[in-house]
Image (cartoon, rainbow, N blue to C red):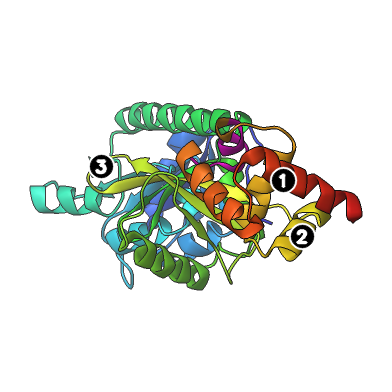
Amino acid sequence: MNAKATSPEPVVLVVDDAIDSIHMLSDALEAEHMTVLVALEGQQALTITRNITPDIILLDALMPHMDGFETCEHLKRNPRLTNVPVIFMTGLSDTEHVVKGLGAGGVDYITKPINPEELVARMKVHIANARLTLSAHRALDTAGQYLFAIDREGRLLWTTPQVQEQLDSAGLQNPEAQTTLASQLREWLSHQPETGHKLPLTPMARHLTLEFLAPLNETDLLLRLLEQRPENSETQSLRHTFGVTSREADVLLWIAQGKTNREIGQILSMSPRTVNKHLEQVFRKLEVDNRTSAAAAAIRCMARH
């Protein structure tokens, strides 16, 4: 089961192939009431984080088989680790390796030999910042704003907890599914979607739809996750009787209940202008001239079923 540790103590994952370094770090961090998990190489770190989400990761830059930079890139492909800070530990302080570590997804670096007091001070700052970010994301979920961000390659940058739960439930947490999702997102983005445009996640997750909200900056984009409820019997009746699309049937249903275009737009997460475009098609298909006549036809249809 994927779960974040429930202990109030921060959970630290130390990834280092040097046993002496691990002993020193474990002693220093446990003295600060932190829970320490240990991985001796990159692949072991990936295995551990499939089931546990640490609060922070200390990552040795130079390790055999998979170095710290590659390990960090793999870790950051796990959406649950997006906001988990990674501090690189390295004996290399030249600009090239510092830039490489930050480019791989690290937030900080500390050079060896490590000063435990300096390390703990930096860790506390990064853990506090990460928890503030998580609190903000949870607040968005509480407000019903299931938001997440992607880059222009379709890769997830961060998600709110509810979004991550929905993606996990839909089976989109494994690397293959994430690659497929990124490919679908890249294709969608190539068509320059505008605010309010939607992408149903079929056939990957038939009940989920993505809505484009806005660019966050030159490289990152903000999206909302929508969970589509199964079509109800009234909508089915309208669709089959009048030959309208599912979305047009949704608009017609709310027209029959006396809702304005603005209210329908809020209910269906679309702009009033889009509602009006759907309504134009509804008038044509129902062969009526106004919303009153359309509403009357819809009410008669639903009364018969």
Magenta-highlighted residues = 263-271
Q: Looking at the image, tell me whether mark 2 or mark 1 is earlier in sequence order.
A: 2
**Is 269 covered by the magenta stretch?**
yes
Are there few (<14), some (14-19), or many (20+) residues within 10 Å of tag 2?
some
Tell whether 179 sits left or right of 208: left
**Which residue is rendered at x = 46% and y = 40% of the image?**
273
Are there few (<14), some (14-19), or many (20+) residues within 10 Å of tag 3?
many
Circle number at residue 236: 2
Q: Are marks 3 and 2 in contact (CB under 8 Å)?
A: no
Question: How many labels, in total?
Answer: 3
Q: Is residue 167 visible?
A: no
Name the image quarter holding the N terminus.
bottom right
Q: Looking at the image, tell me whether mark 1 or mark 3 is earlier in sequence order.
A: 3
**Which residue is rendered at x = 50% and y = 40% of the image?**
55
Q: Residue at label 1?
A: 253
Residue type at numbered disc 3: Tyr
Front label number (1 vs 3): 1
Q: Residue at label 3?
A: 109
Tell whether 238 sits left or right of 77: right
Q: Nearer the viewer, residue 58 or 288?
A: 288
Front label number (3 vs 2): 2
Query: How far apart are the alpha carbons under marks 1 and 3?
Result: 57 Å
Secondary element at image label 2: helix
**Which residue is rendered at x = 60% and y = 53% of the image?**
282
Q: Position of residue 222 (x, y in %)?
A: 40, 43
Q: Position of residue 46 (x, y in %)?
A: 48, 62
Q: Nearer the viewer, residue 275 or 299?
A: 299
Q: Position of residue 114 (x, y in %)?
A: 28, 39
Secondary element at image label 3: strand
Secondary element at image label 1: helix
